[in-house]
Image: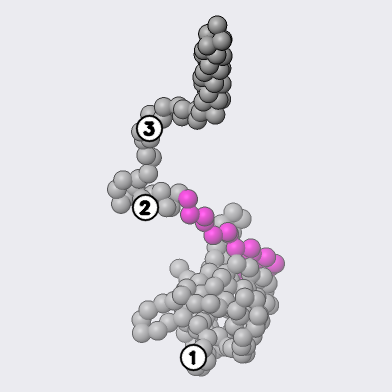
Amino acid sequence: MRYFGFWILVITTTFMIGVGADRAVRHFSVTELPAPTPVKHVVSDLPKTENEVARTVAAVTPTKPNPIFVLDYDRKMFWPWAYFHAYGPMPKTFEIDSIEVALNGFAEQNEGYITVYKTHDYTYKTAGVVFALVTEQRLMFVTEQMPHSEFAYRFDGEFLHTDFEKLGGTNTVVLRGTLTKMKNGQTIAKRTVSFTVEHLGC
């Protein structure tokens, strides 16, 4: 009888240990990861050809803002449409030797343009202006940064004569003012420059 009670105790103890171990394994076992989601193929909208690339770049490239023109003159009496060339040599460090003023005297919507040039061995380096003030006596403008350069320019001058058609090609100084070379808005150099009328616009 004593041995029978002992075996009952052993069996009960073994059973309880097995149940406890099973619960412990279930509690601390690592949860299985879900099956990976199948990869979906994405259709690319990127351009494939060179022409498509060019059109895409053009579409996302921001355009330059329109220049601001302040035109204060009688358009029936004064028509600033001329090509001015520096009278005498310019400093080598200056990237401007000519100014083209082509302001429309009639159209309100298309006011025209002002462009500066640097001529060297039959090649031209050009830049537009971002601001200009034009009266019958004064021409003032600020250029954008010159191409392949760190510098922009400001010109503030006065018209000595306004009969550009009559004086074209006569080597007469018709425009004189201060040309300032700038970097990040800071003055680098300045010089008084005179201009003649080389030829008229079309």
Considering only vertical position in the picture, is 119 above or below 37? below
Q: Secondary structure at mark 2?
A: helix
Whether tag 1 and tag 2 are in contact, CB under 8 A, the answer is: no
Q: Nearer the viewer, residue 97 or 25?
A: 25
Quarter of the N terminus within the rendering: top right
* Foreground tag (1 vs 2): 2
Residue 85 on image: x %, y %: 50, 83
64 drawn magenta: yes
Q: Is residue 65 visible?
A: yes
Which residue matches tag 3? 39
Q: Nearer the viewer, residue 199 or 14?
A: 14
Q: CA distance from mark 1 to mark 2?
A: 37 Å
Callout 3, which amino acid?
A: Val
Q: Earlier in the sequence, mark 2 or mark 3?
A: 3
Which residue matches tag 2? 54
Q: CA distance from mark 2 to mark 3?
A: 32 Å
Considering only vertical position in the picture, is 14 above or below 53? above
Residue at 59% x, 83% y is 181
Residue 64 on image: x %, y %: 54, 60
Considering only vertical position in the picture, is 58 above or below 68? above
Q: Which residues are magenta?
A: 60-79
Which residue matches tag 1? 92
Q: Nearer the viewer, residue 168 or 48?
A: 48
* Foreground tag (1 vs 3): 3
Q: Secondary structure at mark 1?
A: loop
Residue at 42% x, 52% y is 57
Q: Earlier in the sequence, mark 1 or mark 2?
A: 2
14 drawn magenta: no
Whether tag 1 and tag 3 are in contact, CB under 8 A, the answer is: no
Residue 169 on image: x %, y %: 47, 84
Callout 1, which amino acid?
A: Lys
